Amino acid sequence: MTPAHAQARTGADGADQAVRAAHAAFLTARTHSREERAAWLDAIADALESHRTELVEIAGRESHLPDGRLGGELTRTAFQLRLLGEEARRGEFLGATVDHADADWGMGPRPDLRRMNVPLGVVGVFGASNFPFAFSVIGGDSASALAAGCAVVHKLHEAHAELAARTAQIVADALTAAGAPAGLFGAVTGREAAEALVDHPLVKAVGFTGSEAGGRALFDRAVSRPEPIPFYGELGSLNPVVVTEAAWAERGEEILAGWMGSLTMGVGQFCTKPGLLLLPEAGAEAAARVLPGLAAEADLGAGMLTEAIRDGFVVNREAVAASDGVSVLVEGNEENPPAPGVLSVRAAELGEDSEVVRREMFGPAAVLITYADAEELERVLGLLGGQLTGTLHSADGEDTARVVQLLQDRCGRVLRGGWPTGVTVSYAQQHGGPYPAATQHATSVGTAAIGRWLRPVAFQDMEDAQLPPELQEANPLGIARRVDGEWVAAQ
Amino acid sequence: MTPAHAQARTGADGADQAVRAAHAAFLTARTHSREERAAWLDAIADALESHRTELVEIAGRESHLPDGRLGGELTRTAFQLRLLGEEARRGEFLGATVDHADADWGMGPRPDLRRMNVPLGVVGVFGASNFPFAFSVIGGDSASALAAGCAVVHKLHEAHAELAARTAQIVADALTAAGAPAGLFGAVTGREAAEALVDHPLVKAVGFTGSEAGGRALFDRAVSRPEPIPFYGELGSLNPVVVTEAAWAERGEEILAGWMGSLTMGVGQFCTKPGLLLLPEAGAEAAARVLPGLAAEADLGAGMLTEAIRDGFVVNREAVAASDGVSVLVEGNEENPPAPGVLSVRAAELGEDSEVVRREMFGPAAVLITYADAEELERVLGLLGGQLTGTLHSADGEDTARVVQLLQDRCGRVLRGGWPTGVTVSYAQQHGGPYPAATQHATSVGTAAIGRWLRPVAFQDMEDAQLPPELQEANPLGIARRVDGEWVAAQ
């Protein structure tokens, strides 16, 4: 029998078939209630958990990541599916808005007008290599698209081909068993299918997590179509961490230990890895003394995700190391097992085009930047492009308004204390940021991720029975709505 | 003294200066409260109204549109500014979301996380020719961008150069008098400046209303930048109107008269002009008998907006008239004064690539399509691209679910009865639609238009005093927020 992941090795024809099947399924799925669609997400979560042992075993073999991490990631993925399902039940993302007819409206009589968001149709989703569950087959992109009411065709990631194919099969089976139309979730693999997916006229949006080069190429493709479509790409981030003098004086060594812990999580292969630590010069000597020992104690597991990622990491680390003023503080390596490396540079020596402030080293290495004063610190922050996160370690009550503003201007999420790795899935989460952190102003994590797969439609002077129930006068489903400008809570 | 509109004839250097001034103003403006920024919008509205006579006079001379229409449009524009200001006061568009720390969160302990939308910075806005007030200098795009907290650099439209320059001056003066930082609203003109505006690294989004060709060229430019930016373009629409057999039988001649009235408004130069009337074959004979008389009675005013628009109209009308199966029902012309023309075609004779279903005739002409049965009707709707509006004339209680769904699938606004021209400014308005009606899933009219100029930022574990007031625990400004998943109304 042909293994599932070989069956899934599709070309352009296979992509076309998957998209057409998904489109047909979408047309059926939208006749189901949000309650039913939410139950489909629950069914997928249940199926993942019931195959936990098998999936974690395959994932460990393919990714070199430890079982504990993978098990936690599977838990997170199932949780995410259920939270997004719950959000679908609430109908929050519909943005239901009702304007009653108003003969006295200030610009002239207003008709009855009611708007809500509707799903786009078929969505293409590209899995990432570094989170084989949470950002892959049925990760945040796919789950949020299904919650929105869309159909999904997923491009399997070759870094965990067997896991991806097995997961896709489990998802498809769970959906079928739960009563969802066949084809609502499909999978393709290979570059030809990937490109065909982005080009397909029935595909109405794309979600992507990966490298800046690969993501930009697909973005360019999506916006060059006869009908351009939104491309929600999460491409890369350096995730600067600023340590103030007061914070350094208060708990400098604790911060260094925390940094080493965060930058080595997942062998440094996290999009939120804190790749730049901005330390006051007062800390330079202690950092040079302490970091080698912290690095030697770090346990990075068995190896990097793939040979391609390891090769790219080496190239990028060497490019950063070769930048003006950069020296090697901790050597590090990319062997099996790998060891973390730390580069360092004085802020005053950073050029505007330094690789330090623009090149992501996807792997276990980071840069320590020492700054002499606030002016130098602010200059370094000013050199940075868009970031997923920015972190500030300061003392309580310290006036940090300027630094917070500088971080806010270039980051999707600003943290005080703590570390950016470990991204919770919740209502207020924002995982995205100005380009190149993300290609659009949206989040790929949390309930707000659903908003990417929708478009608004207004209905004017419709008969009540012609309206979707969410917009009918009696609000039979009891969702939260904005009525004549005022929010009316869910019932 | 050089007239203002000559001063404004800027090149790339002038655009650079305007953008830099706007950026500096943005940095100051965002330190002002939403209440203060709302007052700036009110001040602009007051200034427009206090210059009503002068502005309507210039607009009439440049656009050939009648005073009554222009005065109404100015009223609408002032109303829009005040409504958007009121929305800024409410803070609705902030999407303020608070997740308290939760040790028992299902995927593991959750930090304190708070998200809100922040303004993008400097926005470029391109004025349209056909609404010299409502979609021009300080129309919906500019007003919504200011309401969002952005700065605006406006590309003046040559079709009403003097009016645009005078309006820009009034806006800038009103802002200064109200205490806004200088440069918050700037203006440029000419193609070179237009392109420099889209390319400028400090410009973070663009709003555009105009032709499909011109809009797509600027869209391509915006997404090809090193840092791609959102381009909110409203490009073109045919605005189909479906008449069912029952509606025809009930009030056929009334519908024909309504159609003629709507398609000749503004000399047919409305983006919501109902360019296609889909009529049952039972109505073909009566339509052929009645429409010439209705056309002869129509008063279209003095002439079309510009020679370029008139020339484009002639080309497009001829291309549609030359399509297979199309005949001329009412000749029409584009002289001064113009007369409306009606083309007609049987649905069965429409090819997939017919110009009838894809080419907008921006001016006083439209196409009558007669269909034999539901199958033919649905086929025609299936041939259409994205539309701003779709209208259904049906009898009360008639089962029209399939047609409504087909309209919803390709339109931003679906009307039952009435006509798509006359777009109210309100909370539930949706002026946009699938491509090419719009380049993004957003609205350019109504309070939701503000959402185009924002991006979300999350704050994790911040000290309360470091947070924007809208996210502080005590909610000192009393805005509506989503707290731990539940909406809490404004206080």
Image (spheres, coloured by chain):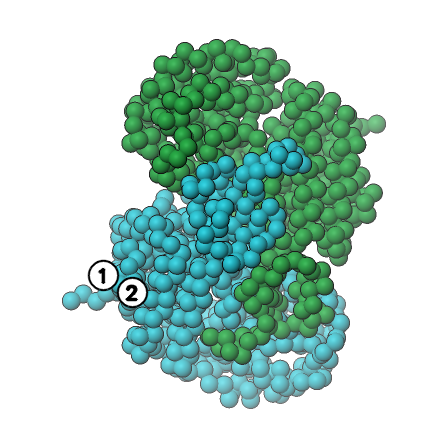
Chain colours: A cyan, B green
First reached walking from the N terminus: tag 2 or tag 1: 1
Q: Position of residue A162 (x, y in %)?
A: 29, 69
Q: Is residue A24 left or right of residue B219?
A: left
Q: Position of residue B373 (x, y in %)?
A: 29, 27
Q: Is residue A399 left or right of residue A39?
A: right
Q: Are marks 2 and 1 in contact (CB under 8 Å)?
A: no
Q: Which residue shows up at 81% across the image and 45% down it?
A: B178
* Residue type for callout 2: Ala
In terms of image quadrants, where is residue B190? top right
Depth check: A81 or B159 in front? A81
Q: Which residue shows up at 39% across the image and 35% down it?
A: B397
Depth check: A357 or A266 in front? A266
Q: Position of residue A240 (x, y in %)?
A: 60, 70
| Whether residue A476 is visible | yes
A350 vs B50: above or below: below
Residue under circle 1? A7
